[in-house]
């Protein structure tokens, strides 16, 4: 009798990587593997890498060093590395030179080949390394082991055409390509039949989505569908309760999408709209294709259309050449917009991007000092925005019991704020309950659910 084999996946980075890991888990389970929470005792260990987050190289190679120790104790363990970092030649060269014991190396565009690569590893008795440097279409119908039963990530497009000067994504995930709307709708309807209440549409720039159906299906054959039009179609999916999306590029956010917020009650009143800098000259050097004034006008139109919409953002501190005055423009923009929360990043060099070659890099101590000032401002405003919700009753999609605070449930407001709450009776994950906000802090809310 064959012993059941196990797998463990370590995921770094964004929601796109999390979704890729769900697909890899689904493919492994179809081959008979069982998920194992302990990498030390797993038969297959995969690291799904990220090139965007700070210190990505250091985290990846540090993790690989730990796994080498696990493998020494279990020599038969298969170790694979995949994801964005595997699309960078200098990373591949380092693996070949210093980590040649790694069995599988594959990139973002051939994740669907994982089962075949595992079979080849066994049959050919040699390491499998397959990186595609250009896309070969979108592979549909792959299995997935979803993290949650009631909410799901749904890819609507892959790649990016923007080429921001600090960003490696266009080089690691390729050019933009959109899924056919019929395939997206088919996936969403299947998820809803399985109990999904909330979907988050994923793309490096969802505003650039342009899907076309080439056969009759959920939309007219040959019809080109824009991102706002896709939202309207999803609004009509019976049983779906909440629609979210990540991430939206300011230069492509259309009046039609703003109108969709008005017309589609399932589209949640939250937008993640990365600004990156509050200074127009820095934005130009970043190749962002909008000005400070453009961005502020966009925020104004969103808030006029959807009063109370939650706005979150990404901000980079210490971009090459950034002066103190230019950083001051970022601080003043944050004060003007008053974000509900912000992901703040120290600029870090990404090999292969234009900005990595520029000579006017900002000293680390200056970047850290500015970063601390920015965090102080964003956290203060976030705390003030949360405090303004105390006393209000909001519909919360319960995500289950709180992992950090026994006795409490946890969930999200329509504006995507985290709420930990008490309830007089049991609340199931995926159930929407009315919660009165009783207290707040910088990053979350406290509340009481009205049951019965």
Image: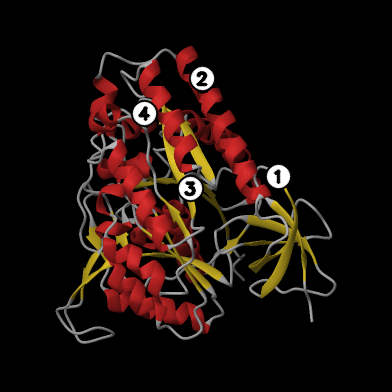
Q: Image quadrant for the C terminus?
A: bottom right
Mark 1 vs mark 4, foreground winner is 1
Looking at the image, residue 285 sits to the left or right of residue 433; the answer is left
Secondary element at tag 2:
helix
Which residue corresponds to mark 2? 368
- Residue sitting nearer the eye, 368 or 72: 368
**Residue 215: image location, x then y, percent:** 18, 83
**Mark 1 or 3, nearer chain start:** 3
- Circle 1 residues within 10 Å: few <14, some 14–19, many ≥20: some
5, above or below 38, in the image = below
Report how far apart the C-alphas of labels 1 and 3 lie in the structure.
17 Å
- Asked if residue 241 shows in the view, the reply is yes
Cα distance in 3D space between marks 1 and 4: 44 Å
Give how far apart the Cα atoms at labels 2 and 1 are. Answer: 25 Å
* Residue located beneath label 3 in the image: 312
> Which residue is identified by label 4?
94
State yes or no: discs 2 and 1 in contact (Cβ < 8 Å).
Answer: no
> Closer to the observer: label 3 or label 2?
3
The answer to which of marks 2 and 4 sits earlier in the sequence is 4
Marks 3 and 2 close (CB-CB < 8 Å): no
Instruction: Give the residue at mark 1.
Output: 441
Residue in the foreground of this view, choosing between 387 and 210: 387
CA gap between label 3 and label 4 equals: 37 Å
Instruction: Indicate the secondary structure of the residue bearing disc 3.
Output: strand
The label nearer to you, 2 versus 4, is 2
- List x then y, in percent, for residue 438: 77, 57
Residue 55 to residue 226: above or below: above
What is the total number of numbered labels drawn onto the structure image? 4
Residue 197 quadrant: bottom right
Residue under the point 76% across and 60% down? 447
């Amino acid at each position: 009798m064959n012993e059941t084999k196990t797998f463990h996946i370590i995921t770094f980075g964004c929601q796109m990587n999390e979704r890729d890991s769900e697909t890899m888990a689904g493919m492994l389970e179809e081959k008979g593997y069982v998920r194992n929470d302990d990498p030390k005792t797993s038969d297959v260990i995969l690291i799904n890498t990220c090139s965007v987050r700070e210190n990505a190289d250091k985290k990846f190679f540090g993790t690989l060093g730990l796994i080498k120790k696990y493998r020494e104790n279990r020599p038969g363990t298969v170790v694979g590395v995949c994801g964005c970092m595997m699309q960078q030649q200098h990373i591949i060269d380092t693996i070949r030179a210093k980590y040649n014991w790694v069995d599988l190396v594959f990139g973002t565009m051939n994740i669907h080949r994982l089962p075949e690569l595992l079979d080849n590893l066994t049959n050919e008795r040699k390491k499998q390394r397959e990186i595609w440097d250009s896309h070969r279409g979108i592979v549909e119908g792959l299995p997935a082991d979803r993290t949650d039963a009631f909410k799901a990530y749904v890819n609507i497009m892959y790649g990016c055409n923007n080429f921001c000067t600090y960003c490696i994504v266009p080089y690691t995930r390729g050019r933009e390509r959109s899924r056919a709307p019929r395939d997206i709708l088919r996936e969403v309807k299947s998820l809803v039949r399985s109990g999904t209440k909330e979907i988050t549409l994923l793309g490096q720039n969802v505003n650039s989505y342009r899907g076309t159906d080439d056969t009759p299906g959920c939309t007219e054959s040959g019809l080109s569908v824009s991102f706002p039009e896709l939202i309207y179609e999803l609004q009509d999916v019976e049983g779906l309760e909440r629609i979210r999306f990540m991430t939206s590029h300011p230069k492509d956010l259309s009046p039609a999408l703003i109108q969709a917020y008005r017309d589609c009650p399932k589209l949640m009143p939250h937008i993640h709209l990365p600004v990156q800098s509050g200074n127009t000259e820095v934005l130009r050097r970043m190749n962002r294709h909008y000005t400070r004034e453009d961005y502020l006008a966009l925020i104004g139109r969103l808030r006029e259309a959807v009063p109370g919409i939650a706005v979150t953002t990404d901000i980079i501190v210490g971009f090459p050449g950034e002066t103190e005055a230019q950083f001051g423009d970022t601080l003043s923009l944050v004060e003007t917009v008053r974000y509900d929360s912000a992901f703040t990043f120290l600029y870090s060099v990404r090999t292969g991007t234009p900005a990595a070659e520029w000579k006017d890099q900002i000293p680390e101590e200056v970047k850290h000092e500015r970063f601390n000032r920015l965090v102080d401002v964003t956290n203060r405003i976030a705390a003030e925005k949360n405090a303004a919700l105390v006393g209000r009753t909001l519909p919360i999609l319960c995500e289950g019991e709180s992992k950090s605070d026994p006795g409490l449930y946890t969930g999200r407001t329509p504006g995507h704020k985290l709420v930990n709450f008490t309830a007089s009776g049991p609340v199931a994950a995926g159930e929407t309950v009315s919660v009165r906000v009783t207290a707040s802090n910088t990053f979350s809310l406290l509340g009481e659910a009205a049951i019965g």
